Image: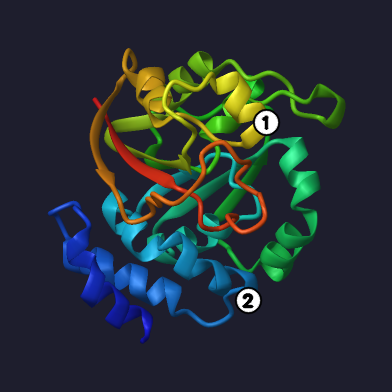
Amino acid sequence: MNCAQVIMSLFLLAPCDDSGGDSIQLAITESLDSTGRLEQDLDRDPLRRPDLVLSFFGIKPGMTVLDLFSGGGYYTEIVSHIVGDKGKVVAHNNKAYVAYEKDQLDQRFNGKRLANVERITAEANELELPEASFDAALAMLTWHDFYYLDEDNGWPSIDENALTEKLCKALKPGAVLGISDHVAAAGSDPAESGQELHRIDPERIKDDLSDSCFTFEGELSILRNPDDDHSKPMFAEGIRGHTDRVVYKFRRK
């Protein structure tokens, strides 16, 4: 089954932005079917379901999108193809991510293969973003990292409230903030679950944004896994790539 057939059979399971739904689906299909995508990205597609996730977020041609803590750039590349020549992706990483993902980032950006992507490297507390510049921002599998700390290996403490305020200023009114992350047990201390398990209680994400400029708009359940043991690290044998994950959409007021 090709990507277009997958979307046609499963897209109705996901809520989506009503405006331009068909054009969004087409752009995402063409992005995922584009030639030259990295082999490791193709392997991740069935596990991450970017067809449904990005449709849910309403990512479409012409947008300017921030990929916060973009890691190896899996979503950066897909979104780059979706937004096209008239759009732009700003792929953010900190120094630790750049070092950890060096081989994949070199492969992804060799030969200027993603011409509409601007890469920025900055620690979260020093991150500067132009005001009211983004139509959407993605924080994919990284909200728990706001509570992670490993200064010896280049991961300083993050002021999550200040980072949220930066996102508020950087996103245009009506812009989408799309978040996905590995689920920790309800009531988990984010400092513990983020540090030890690389997970977060989904309610903590909502709490972090409850007094901000963002309003919760919905959840996509396609990546939920009731068989996942929330007490194990997300990279534990047998569960990596199959964790219970939330997909939340917030809207900038």
| Quarter occupied by residue 154 | top right
Hey, which residue is sitting farthest bottom in the picture?
1
**Secondary structure under the numbered disc 2 in the rendered image:** helix
Res 200 seen here: yes
Q: Mark 1 points at which residue?
A: 196
Q: Which residue is drawn at 69% across and 18% down?
A: 157
The residue that mark 2 highlights is 39
- Left or right placement of residue 220 versus residue 195 in this view: left
Badge 1 crowding class, 10 Å Cα cut-off, few under 14, some 14 to 19, many 20 or more, is some
Q: Please, is residue 213 above or below residue 198 in the view?
A: above
Mark 2 touches mark 1? (CB < 8 Å): no
Residue 60 appears in the rendering: no
Q: Is 53 situated left or right of 158 in this image?
A: left
Q: Where does the N terminus fall, quadrant-wise?
A: bottom left
Check the picture and name the quadrant holding the C terminus.
top left
* Displayed quadrant of residue 24: bottom left
